[in-house]
Amino acid sequence: MSRIELRGINKYYGRNHVLKDINLVIEDGEFMTLLGPSGCGKTTTLRVVAGLEKPQEGYMYMGDREIVNAPEKFYEEPGKRHLNLVFQSYALWPHMTVFDNVAFGLEVAKVPKEEIRRKVENALKRMRIEAFIDRYPSELSGGQQQRVAIARAIVSEPEVLLLDEPLSNLDAKLRIEMRSEIKRLHQELGTTIIYVTHDQTEALTMSTKIAIFFEGVLEQVAPPMELYQNPASLRVADFIGNPKVNFLPGKARVAGDTMTVESVLGTASYDRKSFTGEAPGDGSFEAVVGVRPELVEILDGPAEGSIEAEVYSVMPAGSETTIYLEVGGERILSKQNGLKQYSPDQKVWLRINPDKMNVFCKDSGRLAKLAVMDAQQDQQNSIK
C-alpha cells in the first residue's frame, strides 16, 4: 500500500517556520501535485516524504507503517521507504551510458544480471528511449536526459514516485511533450506520484489532485477543476488561471436562505445550498466577486441579462483573443476563442452566468459562495 498521510507536520529552519501544521492524505495510485510560488514549502514537503528532511513535529504514515514520529525522534531511513526521487537537475552520471545509469540502483541491490537487463529495457521502452541505450548523457538532449532520469526512477518499481520540478529546465515545446509522457506513465503504472511545480498548467493538466501552498500553509486540496472553479480563497483564485481571474468589489447580504450580491455586473441572488461556512447566518459583508475571463460573453447588441461595456484594448493571439473591457469604472478581462475583431472605445454588451461566479468575503479572503461546477449546473439565476 502506498497511501501516504502527513499529520501535523511542522518544519523549522532556525526561527523560520517553513511548514505550518501540514495535514495531507495522498491516496494509493493518486497523482498529487504540490503547487505554489517559490518558497511556499512544497519542495520541503516532498523532502519530508522522501526522508531528506526531518520535521520537528508531526507524523507520517505509508499504508499501515509509521514512517515519521517526530515526538519520539523516529525517522525511517530514506532507503526503506520504497520510493524514488527525480531531481530537477536529472543527476545523471556523465561517465556512464544510459543503460548503466538506469541499472545502477539494481546493481547496488545485487539483482541478477538477466533481470537487470530485462527491467532496464522495459523502463527505457516505457520512456521511448530504448534506441539510446548505449549513449552517454552528453549525447542526449535535455528532454532525453529527463526521460533517462525518470526511467532510472521507475526501473525498481517503487511504491511512490517523487518528482521535484522535473520539467523546469526544458523549453516550452519539450515541457508540453513531457507532461503528456508523465501523465501516460501514471495511467499505465498506477504508481502513486507526488509532483512539485510552480507551474499551474502542469498541475491542472496532469494531476488527479492538487495541494496548493502559500508561505508554509496548505491552503486547499482538491481535484484540478474544483480548485479552478471553486478556489477556497482569494489568493488561490489569483494564483490559478491564465489569464487571471477578474476580481470585482461588491456588497453581499444574507437574509434567511438567500444571499444577494451587488456589483458592477448587477444584482444576483443565491440560495443557501451554494453557501460555504464562511457565509454569515444573516447580515451584510463586503464582498469580492470572482469571474473567470472565459465566462465573460461579449455580445454585439443588448440581450436579456446583458450589461453595457466599452472595449479598452484587444490582444489577438491566434487561437484566442483577450479583450479588456470597462464597466462602471471597473476593468474586466474576457477570453474568446479564435480571432475576434473589436476596436478601442467600441460599445458592446456582456453576459455572465451568475451561477458561475465566486463570491469571497473581503475581510477574511475566504470563499463564501460556491460557483456551480459545469457538471452540476441545472438552472441559471438571472442578473437584473
Image (cartoon, helix red, strand yellow):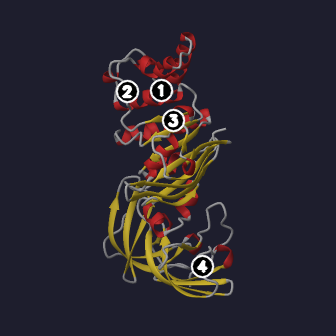
Mark 3 neighbour class, 10 Å CA radius: few under 14, some 14 to 19, many 20 or more: some
- Which residue does the numbered mark 4 point to in the structure image? 279
Horizontal side, residue 246 vs residue 278: left or right? left
Residue drawn at 34 percent across, 40 percent down: 171
Q: Give the residue at mark 1.
A: 152
Q: Circle 1 sits in a helix, a strand or a loop, which is it?
A: helix
- Of the two numbered discs 1 and 2 on the same chain, state the one appearing first in sequence: 2
Measure the C-alpha gap from mark 3 to mark 2: 20 Å
Residue 78: numbered disc: 3
Name the N-terminal-most of marks 1 and 3.
3
Spatial CA distance of label 3 from label 4 is 45 Å
Mark earlier in primary sequence (3, 2): 3
Specify the amino acid type for callout 1: Arg
* Relative to 184, residue 23 above or below: below
Can you tell which of label 2 and label 4 is closer to the viewer? 2
Image quadrant of residue 134?
top left
- In the rendered image, the vertical position of residue 278 relative to residue 267, given as above or below: above
Contact check, label 2 and label 4, Cβ < 8 Å:
no
Q: Which residue is mark 2?
A: 92
**Do the residues under discs 1 and 3 have CB atoms within 8 angstroms?**
no
